[in-house]
Image (cartoon, helix red, strand yellow):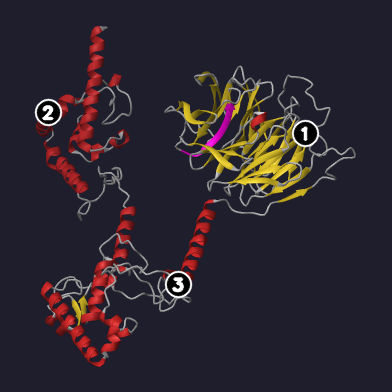
Amino acid sequence: MITYMLFYISMNLGTFACIVSFGLRTGIDNIRDYARLYAKDPFFSFLRVKPNLWYCSSTHSYGTQGPLGGFGYTSVGPILDDSHKTLRSLNTSFPKFKTKSLMDLLRAYSDDQNPNSPASSPSPESSPPRLLPPKSAAPQVDDTMLALTVAKNRSAMTRPIDPTQHLVDFNPTYDQLWAPIYGPSHPYAKDGLAQGMRNHKLGFVEDAAIEPFIFDEQYNTFQNYGYAADPSASAGYNYVGDMTALQKNDAVSVYNIPQHEQKKRKIEKRKENDEDGDDNAEMVDPEEVANPASEAWLMKNRKSPWAGKKEGPPVELTEEQKKYAEEYAKKKGEEKGGGDKGEAVVEKTTFHGKEERDYQGRSWIAQPKDAKASNDHCYIPKRLVHTWSGHTKGVNAIRFFPNSGHLILSAGLDTKCKIWDVSNTGKCMRTYMGHSKAVRDICFSNDGSKFLSAGYDKNIKYWDTETGQVISTFSTGKVPYVVKLNPDDDKQNVLLAGMSDKKIVQWDMNEGKITQEYDQHLGAVNTITFVDNNRRFVTSSDDKSLRVWEFGIPVVIKYISEPHMHSMPSISLHPNSNWLAAQSMDNQILIYSTREKFQLNKKKRFAGHVVAGYACQVNFSPDGRFVFSGDGEGRCWFWDWKSCKVFRTLKCHEGVCIGAAWHPLEQSKVATCGWDGLIKYWD
């Protein structure tokens, strides 16, 4: 069994050697093409004549019979390796075959290799010749884009340049640069230049790389001497104009005349003036020269404008001159004083109600007798119940009537103040017109019978609420940003105003005089808030600080300023008077204590709204349970005082919701105002 297996393996190896040998000799790898190759190769013909020499075992052959019969398992290695010996034995055994058949086969084989030979005749039994296509190991490259790029570059090098083109990505030739413009002229172009390219009445003028001083120098040189430098010439003799004058003046310009030439010209000019003076002196009468009123005296004693004045003896003014000087000084003083004051406007008022007094003779501003708080517990409003629209521009501030809240006062950017009925008709009751510019702030007196208004026209006006008459006007020539009356009943005649010139000015309205100035801030004053039983007041400013003052004493007793602080345009006092809520411009509400130290309460901070850039008013509910404020997106935010969490938000206005106020008696009613000109009432 082992011997048979070894014999079987040797036959397979011989078959493989046979296939490799045939492939190397014939150059083909198709087994079907091995058929009838014995007719072309003398070696194969020998195998046909003497097949027994290479047959090893016919019983184990597979495939076709004939010269290659038993191809699968026949070993032909000894014959292929020693082909010369086989041919030599063939010659000795078959001498005729050597002389005839073998030579014919060689000739036929050579004829097959050279088909163009005239003696070649294909064998009828041979297979047709097969031509193999040539192959290349180099990869095939698509050169279409390369050809297009080359063609584009060639066309760019030959086509003319567009005169409107400012950037050329190749080096054009001289002919391309100076080639004429091809094609028909523009129908709306004058002188061959499109209207859009024209920046001068004569065409298109390009900016030249020349300084204005150099241009003026060459221009004046050409006007005076007749020659100037040629800016278009790159090198060499680059002058245009009168060449004779150029050589004569040694090519100097009007700005670089030599020193000796300047002195020479001054001397010549002085001689000419002296000669003219001598000629005039001969013609002028000596009496006229001695008379100061004559022109000859003025010509002789004339001086240059910078020679200085010669002081003479003082001349007394006549009575008429003195009177004129006094009137002129008085007029100037009035103009100077009037410039610092506010703009004067005729005050007017309009009553819109049915009648100013009812059948019992009570005024329309009288508080209703049944106006009482039914419950001390406040609730957040949910819905809109009324809208007041009467201002033609935005509303800057709103204030409820003190104690009762049956009326609401508004300050508009349309220079007007309006008061509206809240409890009954819901209509506008009276309009106050006395400012020439927008109204910034308003403030009621304790009983509501009078109120203050501060406008951007630099005036502070004190109004009678009922009649609409202006009681008095105050002004320092600066814009008042906030106005406040002293809350004490016995000091209702004291007015405090924060001005744009960093001062807090205090007036006595009975006398109309300034009684005190608080001048410590470094920026415009935004708020004034009384604390500690009205003995002190807190002010905020654009200088990002808080300052605490004793009323009547212009000395700061507490100064609060930290690097993280921002400007605070609105401050409100908590109903228990222990805390201050300050609207900070970094989108948060900060809480400060009103005790001695005025410390920041770091545990309470109300945020979520966006007020940066707007002086949105912050306020408290009457019971102190809620903090609320408008924002720059037209919403009103409500926070819980204890938890500092957002309780509710209401979309109130289109634009900025600048002000919000809680009704003093109604526990769930809030009024808001915005720069859309509306005042809305929520419940």
Residue at the spot of label 3: 195
Indicate the quadrant where residue 380 lies.
Answer: top right
Identify the residue at horizontal 39%, vertical 75% (top origin): 203
Cα separation, mark 2 vs mark 3, equals: 99 Å
Q: Which residue is mark 1?
A: 406
Which residue is label 2 attached to? 82
Q: Which mark is residue 603?
A: none
- Measured in 3D between alpha carbons, the distance from the residue under mark 1 to the one under mark 2, in whole angstroms, is 134 Å
**Residue type beneath disc 1:** His
Q: Give the camera-side residue of 409 and 9.
A: 409
SS for tag 3?
helix
Quadrant assignment, res 20: top left
Q: Is residue 524 magenta?
A: yes
Location of the N terminus by quadrant is top left
The image shows a total of numbered marks equal to 3
Counting from the top left corner in percent of width and height, residue 88 is at 9, 32
Q: Is residue 62 visible?
A: yes
What segment is highlighted magenta in the picture?
523-530
In the rendered view, tell whether residue 664 sits above or below residue 2: below
Q: Is residue 452 left or right of residue 458?
A: right
Q: Earlier in the sequence, mark 1 or mark 2?
A: 2
Comparing 417 with 267, the one in front is 267
Please name which of the two marks, 1 or 2, marks the residue nearer to the observer: 1
| Residue 48 visible | no
> Is residue 620 shown left or right of residue 246?
right
- N-term-proximal mark, 2 vs 3: 2
Residue furthest right as drawn: 359
Residue type, numbered disc 3: Gln
Would residue 412 be counted in the magenta stretch?
no
Q: CA distance from mark 3 to mark 1?
A: 69 Å
Q: Residue at x 19, y 87 (%)?
A: 275
